[in-house]
Amino acid sequence: MNDFAKIPPQDIDLEKIILGAIILEPGQFDILQKYLKPETFYLQAHSKIFESIIKIKNTGAPVDLIILTNYMRENQILDNVGGAYYISSLTSNVASGANLETYCQKLAELFIKREIIRLSHESINKVYENKDIVDIYANLVNSLDSLFDFKLCENKKISDVMDDRLEHISKMEPGKIIGISSGISNIDTTFGGWQDSDMITLAARPSMGKTAVSLLFAKAPIFRQRKKVLYFSLEMPGFRLADRILSLETGINSELMQNGNLTDKDWLSLSDTAQRYRSANFLVNDESGLTIEEIRAISVLENRKEKIDLIIIDYIQLIGFSFRDSRSTNDQVSHISKNIKNLGKKLNIPVIALSQLSRDVEKRSNKRPELSDLRDSGSIEQDSDLVMFLYRDEYYNPETDNKNEIEIIIRKNRNGRIGTDTIYKNDNWSYISDRPYEEWISERIPEF
């Protein structure tokens, strides 16, 4: 038999039992709703009946046979589902509500199977229509992946949560961070590093050092903890990112690499650094214009190969818009921000997202950024667990005493303090660390 002619996975009798039980015992609805939505039901009439039950419940009214029948009659959908007799007949199929939750789980599984079939057929059609392969892949992977986000939303006793937390704390070693190292001692000591599922936003105006600092954040877990980092470089191509890393590791001005004016000693230093990174679990994706759905698909697929420990995205405003309609930039960026947060929660890892700031910063006498300066959407602030800004006083005040200093200003932190830490660079950006360059160069101590 042709696959397209097969009857999709479904169980009409099971649907009748579930609807009948809800009509007879309305209290069951609140328990079962987490498994069901109108489209979970294969029969269109059953989908309409369940949708009507939801709408009645949303008004605060109780649901019983008479109220449901009258509601559907008033909204002119009663005859379309078989009339009052059919709704009444649903209740005759219920023998006991003892296994109702199991029935709903089974119905949800049948719905997922039907969706897999539908999504597969859609992808096949898109292939024949010669649609973009990256879009086909991203949409398919994300849609399939979202089907299995279905969770049993059980309530937990707070005492059980406390016991789990105490067990976790008891395994901690004093002085050892429990999260992903940031490469900055004060942040690691105070916060315990970046924590799982957190969205960390690193924002600044141009020339403040966003990319350089993000590479410090990437480097620390790779070498200190042997972690796997996935870096989305939407702004610069991979070879430019490699130049930045080589410069920061060796202290060689990146301009010398670009014009080839290198000494034998420079070449030896660059070769040693490249050799060191061969064993580093540091992945870079430099495809421009990726949508957040494509970033999610790439991340999920890579995580299935081998667990990712940290994702860095450079930067939010360069992520391609998902919606092709006339929605505002604010709506588009809100969608991106929420999905960055959801990506961290799904993979249970920290995600660091770089962001631009609005030009309003330049209009103030004090150029240190505020939360209100986050560009394009308030959702970035809302979704972030930690918001950090970068500020270099010498950029605005060339005669300052704070040359080669970068302030990391923490304006929001759901789980701890806010305040300012300082890291340091040198004149040509070939050094960045939480130790002043002069101190480091005088001792000639490698950073790691």
Image (tube, rainbow, N blue to C red):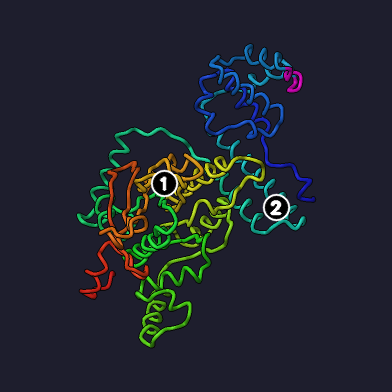
- Image position of 127 (left or right of 366): right
Question: Which of 279/89 is in front?
Answer: 279
Residue 379 screen position, x and y as percent: 47, 40
As drawn, which residue projects farthest toward the front?
A: 399
| Quarter that holds the C terminus | bottom left
Q: Which residue is label 1 attached to?
A: 361
The residue at 47%/39% (across/down) is: 378
Q: Is residue 343 magenta?
A: no
Label count reads: 2
Q: Are marks 2 and 1 in contact (CB under 8 Å)?
A: no
Q: Can you see residue 373?
A: yes
Q: Indicate which disc, 2 or 1, sits on the residue closer to the N terminus.
A: 2
What stretch of residues is rendered in magenta?
A: 76-82
- Image position of 296 (left or right of 93): left
Q: Which mark is residue 123?
A: 2
Residue 98 screen position, x and y as percent: 51, 26
Question: Which of 66/325 is in front?
Answer: 325
Q: Is residue 80 magenta?
A: yes
Q: Residues within 10 Å of mark 2 (few under 14, many from 20)?
A: some
* Element at label 1: helix
What amino acid is found at the position of numbered circle 1 in the picture? Val
